[in-house]
Amino acid sequence: MSIRRSGMNQKSTEERYDFRTIEKKWQKRWEEQQTFRAEERSSKPKFYGLVFFPYPSGAGISVGHCRNYIPMDVVCRYKAMKGYNVLQPMGWDAFGQPAENEAIKRGRNPREMVPEYAANYKRQCKLVGLAYDWSREINSSLPEYYKWTQWFFLLLYHRGLAYRATTPINWCSSCKTGLANEEVVGGLCWRCDTPVEKRPMPQWYFRITKYADRLLADLDTIDWPEGIKAMQRDWIGRSEGAQVTFGVAGHEDESLTVFTTRPDTLWGATFMVLAPEHPLVLKITTADNLDKVKAYIEQSQRTSEIDRMNVNRAKTGVFTGAYAINPVNGAKIPIFIADYVLMGYGTGAIMAVPAHDQRDFEFARKHNLPVVLVYRSSPDQTAESMTEAVPDGGYMIDFTGQTGGIDFPFAGLPAGQETVQKVIRWLEEKGFGKGVVNYRLRDWLISRQRYWGAPIPIIHCPKCGEVPVPYEQLPVLLPEVEKYQPTGTGESPLAGIPEFVHVDCPTCGGPARRETDTMGGFACSSWYFLRFADPHNDAEPFSKEAVDYWLPVDLYTGGAEHAVMHLLYARFWTKVMYDAGLINFQEPFSTLRNQGMLLAYTPGREIKPEKSGAAKGAGGANGAGGAGGAGGADEEAPEDAAGLVENWKVLKPEERETIPQSEWVYRWIKMSKSMGNVVTPDEIAEKYGADTLRVYTLFVAPFEETVQWRDEGVEGANRYLNRLWRLWNDLYPYYESGRRLLKEDDGWKATLTAAQRQLRRKLHQTIRKVGEDIENFRFNTAVAALMEYTNELSAFRNTLANGSQPAPETLALLAECVETLPLLLSPIAPHLAEELWERLGHSSSIYYEPWPAVDEAAAAEEAITIVVQVNGKVRSRLTVPVDTPDSALEQLALGDKTVAAALAGKKVRRVIVVPGKLVNIVAG
RNA sequence: GCGGGCGUGGCGGAAUUGGCAGACGCGACGGACUUAGGAUCCGUUGGGUAAAACCAUGAGAGUUCAAGUCUCUCCGCCCGCACCA
C-alpha cells in the first residue's frame, strides 16, 4: 500500500495560484517583447487566423465576444507551436451607424469617442491574453484607412461596377437612410426594427448582380458551414427559365415580357398579372378601368412591406381592361395587376397558369378566371374538379388544332426539366422567347445619408457630369461638422457644409459639387482582411507581395448573423480585385466557422399577452434582432422593443429595485447590452483570472453550440487550474534530478513498471488528442483530455512514497510529465503555462516552443479489453495483448465462464470477431 | 411552406469507419482533514434489483451478428428565408 499524499504534507505549496500577479506579469512581458508579432518574411508556412471585424462600442467586449476570440486564439497559439508563422490581427470597424448613434446620444464627437472605445477593447483583449499582433492594429475611420476604401470605390467605378440610379429604395425613417435589401429583415430595418418604406431617391449601387453566378459557383470551393452556404445560395436565388414575349391587343407597338420557370405550361396561361408598379400599366389600362387601377396602385403603395409579405393574404388584384396575346396559341388573355407580383423580381410580369401554380389558382378562383390543364395524370382529371393547383407530374395534353395554326410537338411528354428544356429550344426557334437565368440577388445599395462614413469620391459637374475624384486627390476627407444628426430631408449632413460641397471639377475646372453621401460600413469590412497583411502601406492599399504571402485567411470565425451581408460583400470585392489583377485568389476565407450564441439567465416579468401593436417579438425567443453577441454587428433595439420576448420582459434596472424577487421570472436569453445581462471578461478575470475564463469558455460546449453562461461552471474551471497548479508544484521537486536522465539517454523508458508505462501512455495519447482536437475545433474535448490526463497524473502522484526519493526512471518520467504539462496547457491557459515554463528554468516565452512530439510507441496500447457479446449483449470482457489473433480471441471468448453460462443449452451459429474491439457469439 | 441544424442522466456535454452509451465537468450524496469550510483530498452518482436479470440516447418501424450513429414515418425545439413567377 502506498502512502497517500495529503495536502497537509505540502504546506509549502500554495493552495491557490496567484493569477492576478501571474497574468499581469505575462501580459506585460508579451507586450514588451512583442511576442505575438508576425514575421514579415519567413520560410515558415503561414497561418492567418481572423475574427469578424468588431465595432468598438462603449460597453466594451462581453464574454460573448470571448466565445469567438478565445478559440481562435487557441488555434493561433497552437499553430505557432506547430511551426507556423502566425498572423492574428485585430482592428476596429469604427465607421457606421452604431458609432454615430452613440456619438449623437452622448453628444460626443465620434472622432474622440471611437478611439477611446477602441482603446478599451484593446485593453480587454489583452486582459484575456489574446495573442494579437497589435503592430497591425487598424481603424477603418482613419483617413489612412478610408483613403483606400475610397480607392476601391473608384476601382469598382472604373470597372463599371458602381453606378448611381434613382429607383425606389428601402428607407428607414428611424435611421434616416437607405438600406440594401440584405439589411431589410422581415420588412424591418435590421438595425432598429423600424418598418421600412419605399422612397425614390438617387443612390449609389455596386453591381454585385454581375457576379451572382461566380458568387454561387465558388461556394463549392470553400470550407464553410453548410447553413451559411445555403443562406447565400438562397439569397442569390438562381433560377432557370425563359422570358416569353406576349403581344398586347390593340397596342401593336407594345409588348410584355414575362419571366417563367415553367414555359412548358404556356398553353395553360389564362391570364397575365403585372406588378402594380409595372411601367406599362397605365399605358394599357382602358378608360373604364382607369379609376379602379389607379386606386389599386395607390393602395398597394400604402400597404406596408410587412403586410405585402404575408403569404396567407387573399390574392387581391384588378383587371386593366387590356388583353395579352399568347404567342404559342394566339389566345387573348386578360391582363390584371396584383401586388403578389413584385416589380423587383424577374420582369415584374407573369403569365398565370392556374392549373399548375397555386397562387395563380387562388387568384383565378377568386376572380372567376378559367383554369386550363396542360398536364394530366389520369384521363378523367378535369380543371373543373380541381381544388388546388398541380405543380408537377402528369403528361402533356395534346393541344394540336387549338393553337391557332402554330405547331405543337409536345403531346404526351412527361412533366420535368427535360420537357422544359425542349420547350425553351422551341420558343427560341420560333422567336417567342429565350432561355434565361434569373437571380433574386439585387445590386448592393452603398449610399448612406449619414455623417460617419467614408465620403463617396465622386464630383458632380454641371458640364462633365459625374466625375470620379482623381486617385491622387484621395482621401476625400470627412469634414468636421457641428451636428452629426441626419438632416431629416433625406440628405447627408455633409450637404450642409459649403466648403465640402463646393469644389472645382477635376476635368474642366469649373464649379462643381461633391457627392455628399457616405459609404455604408460594409464597404470598410469588405477589404480589411487584406489590409492586415500590410497595414501601414501609404502608397497602395496593400502590397501584392504581402497579400500573396498571407492571404487568403486560413480560418475566419464570427457569428452567423453576417451570413449574407458581410460575407457576401467581402467575397464580391475579392472577386473584383482578382479580376483587376490585384490578388491571385478568388475566395477570401478558406475556412469559416460560426460560434454559438451565449445565453444568460435573465430576470424578467410576465406581461399580458394582448397589446395591439406589439405583435413583433412573436418570432422567437432570441430577443430583439438576431445578431450574435460577438463580431461586427452591434444591433441596438429601440427602447420599446427591447427585452420583449413572448409575453415576457426583461426587468429594467429600476424594476429590479421595485419588484420583489419572488415575482421575477427567469429566462435564458441572448446576452446583450440591450438586455442588461452582460457578463464582462473584466469581472471574470478579476475574480477567477483570464485563464479560468478561457478554460470555461472552451470547455462548456462545442464551439458552434449555443451555451448558457453559468457561474458554477466557471468555478469548476477555476478549481481545475488550481488542482493542476498544486499537482505540478507537488511534482516539480523531482524535476531537476529527473531532467538529467530524461535528456541523457532513453534507457529509462525500458525499465518502467506497468503503472508507469500506463501513465506515459496517457501522456502521449493526450498530446495527440489535444492537438487533434484543437485542429478540429473540438476545444471542449481537448480540455476534457487534459483533465483526464491530470487526473491520472494526480493518482500517480498519490502512489509516490512520501519523502523518499523515487527510482531514477520514475524521476525521468515525472520530469517528462512536469515539462510537458505547460506545453499542452499553453494554447488554452497561456499565462499559467508561461509561469510554469519559467519555473522550469526557461527564459524565453513558451509561445515559441515546439508542440511536444507524440512518442507513438509509448502511446500504443499494450493490452486491450475485448468485449464478449452473446447475441449482441455484453456478457464478459477479456484483457488480451494487442496482437492476439482472431482465432485465439474466439477460443478465449468461448472458454470464458460467464459466456459459457450464457451459452448453456444454445447452439453457437456464428462468431463475429472485430479485431481490437469485440467478439459477438450468435447462438440460439 | 421551403432550406439548414438539433433532440443522450438532475444539468452542460462525451462516444473513430455502426462495435463496452454516459468520457470530462457541474450539481447532489457519503467520508477524510479541520475551531470552521462555500477550501482541499478520497469515494458514490442513468433507471431498476438484496444482487442479478432487465430497461434506457424524442416516438414508432426497418436494415444488421451489432444502431445514439444508417434508412423510413412521425413528434418537438432552434436558426435562416418566405407570394421569387
Image: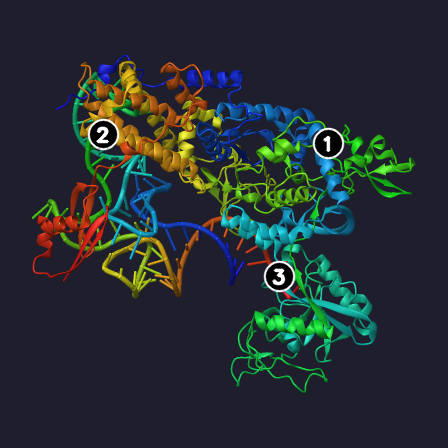
Q: Which residue is mark 3?
A: A239
The chain identifier of the residue carrying mark 3 reads A
Please give the label number shown on residue A812. none
Instruction: Specify which label sits upstream in the sequence, 2 or 3.
Output: 3
Q: Secondary structure at mark 3?
A: strand
Please determine whether, in this image, residue A194 is positioned above or below residue A359: above
Give the quadrant of residue A784. top left
Where is the N terminus of chain A found, in terms of image quarters? top left
Name, please, the residue furthest toward the bottom: A401
SS for callout 1: helix
Query: Helix or strand or loop: what does disc 2 sit on?
Result: helix
Q: Amino acid at mark 3?
A: Ser
Gap between marks 2 and 1 measured at Cα: 63 Å
Q: Position of residue A843 (x, y in %)?
A: 43, 14
Tags 2 and 1 on a common chain: yes
Q: Amino acid at mark 2?
A: Arg
List x then y, in percent, for residue A869: 18, 52
Evaluate whether label 2 is on the same chain as label 3: yes
Between marks 2 and 3 in the image, the one whose residue lies nearer the viewer: 2
Q: Earlier in the sequence, mark 1 or mark 3?
A: 1
**Residue A602: image location, x then y, percent:** 46, 38
Q: Mark 2: few, some, or many residues within 10 Å (few <14, many ≥20)?
A: some
- The residue beneath circle 1 is A147
Residue pointed to by mark 2:
A757
Q: Reply above or below: A275 against A713.
A: below
- Disc 2 chain ID: A
